[in-house]
Image (tube, rainbow, N blue to C red):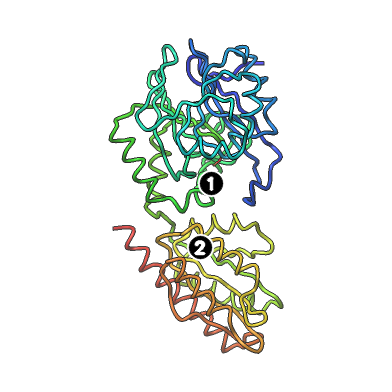
Amino acid sequence: MKNIEIKPDIYWVGAVDWAIRDFHGYNTPNGTTYNNYLINDQKVTLVDAVKYEYCSSTIENINKIVDISKVVNIVVNHIEPDHAGSIDMIMKLVPDALIYITERGKKGIERYFDTSKWNFKIVKSGDVLKTGKYTLLFLETPMLHWPDSMVTYVKEAKLLISQDAFGQHIATSARFDDEFLKSNSQVELDDAVVDYYANILMPFGQLIKTKIADIVKLGLDFDMIAPDHGLIWRTDPGGIIQKYLDMANGRADLRVAVVYDTMWHSTEHMMAPIIQGIRDEDVDCKAIKLRESPMSFAVKEIWKARGCLIGAPTINNVMFPSLAQFLYHLGGLKPKNRIMAAFGSYGWAGGAVREAYEMFKRIGVEVMEPGIQIQYRPSSEDEEKCYEFGREFAIKVKEYHKKFEE
Ligand code: FEO
């Protein structure tokens, strides 16, 4: 079996998780990979570990290149268990290895493992490790996306090992973007990038811009970005950086995502004329029924669209639970540069639409007010109102979208 050499004497030694569909609540229909890298230099250095379940697989990959006992350094770019979960197993094999980690990383990893016998070297931005022919430069990236996070730049290899940043949840036999694109589409790859960004990195847009600016300022020359999930970017690493900058700046398409649920189809009945109204304003629209779709799918669709409508029935004077859960989760993701409005049906008293607007304000998105609510089943007059609501929302979305095109 061939080893996967990504640069001279630098190897991918990670694992492909074909089966995972629930990544801490995030639906991953295409699985994922846990990438880590072995620098087989004079001082053999492992950059990141893998998820606990894949420990034996990464050890096997390392042993095919060099006996694991030769590993003298371990770089921990990020302590989340999908990467650092197997480190105690590895440390049992190389107990004298020196762990390069940020101060916050050390404090965090001590909460997961008994580290009392481990050797640490605390690093901060600008610190370097010479492994022989290679120089590793560490750059802290706090809150991208954990406090401990950092990236490792391998100067002579022009390689940026970026931990979670620039990743995608795709399980594939391809390791590089160009390999993947030989038999898969660019659309599929772009969709995976957006899905990952929306569900993991959406709250950190401002930090992403700052950190990318820092990297540009340092003038780092790299022709490969190797993330900890999915494909390694070697065709056009500048392209994925630009995509991240666009998303961090709030890039979205001129379209509307309708995230809804329905009890006895009344809210769904409202949706048909609303979508017709949006369509008649030449704005594309996609509806996602929450109980039939993973929440992460709805998050991605919202992130792709400039406008979002919430269709929420009222139950016991409050919002239907799936929508309440979704908006609560969205509040944590802090979407920026999006416009939202709400509609829904109720029986004896409303509540859901009012609550939706309260949540929009907490999230901090633009809103179109008022929303629209209908008692029981919409009449033909109500349907007309819904149609006009859809048109009016599409017009507002178009106006709002112009701000981002200037
Ligand atoms: Fe892939 Fe933040 O761990």
Q: Amino acid at mark 2?
A: Gly
Separation of residues labelled 2 and 1 (CA atoms): 17 Å
Task: Using the image as rendered, state which of residue 196 and residue 104 is in the foreground.
Answer: 104
According to the picture, the residue beneath numbered tag 2 turns out to be 331
Q: Position of residue 361 (x, y in %)?
A: 45, 71
**Amino acid residing under circle 1:** Tyr
Q: Residue at x 49, y 30 (%)?
A: 226
Image: 345 above or below 99: below
Left or right: residue 109 compared with residue 101: right
Residue 179, position as x, y percentages in the image: 55, 28
Question: The N terminus lies in which quarter of the figure?
Answer: top right
Residue 192 in percent (x, y) is at 55, 44
Residue 111 in percent (x, y) is at: 59, 40
Q: In this rendering, which labeled residue sits more in front, label 2 or label 1?
A: 2
The circle on residue 196 is 1
Q: From the viewer's perspective, is residue 330 above or below residue 48?
A: below
Would you identify the image quadrant in which residue 231 lies? top right
Q: Are marks 2 and 1 in contact (CB under 8 Å)?
A: no
Left or right for 318, reference 356: right
Q: Nearer the viewer, residue 34 or 391?
A: 34
- Ligand 1 quadrant? top right
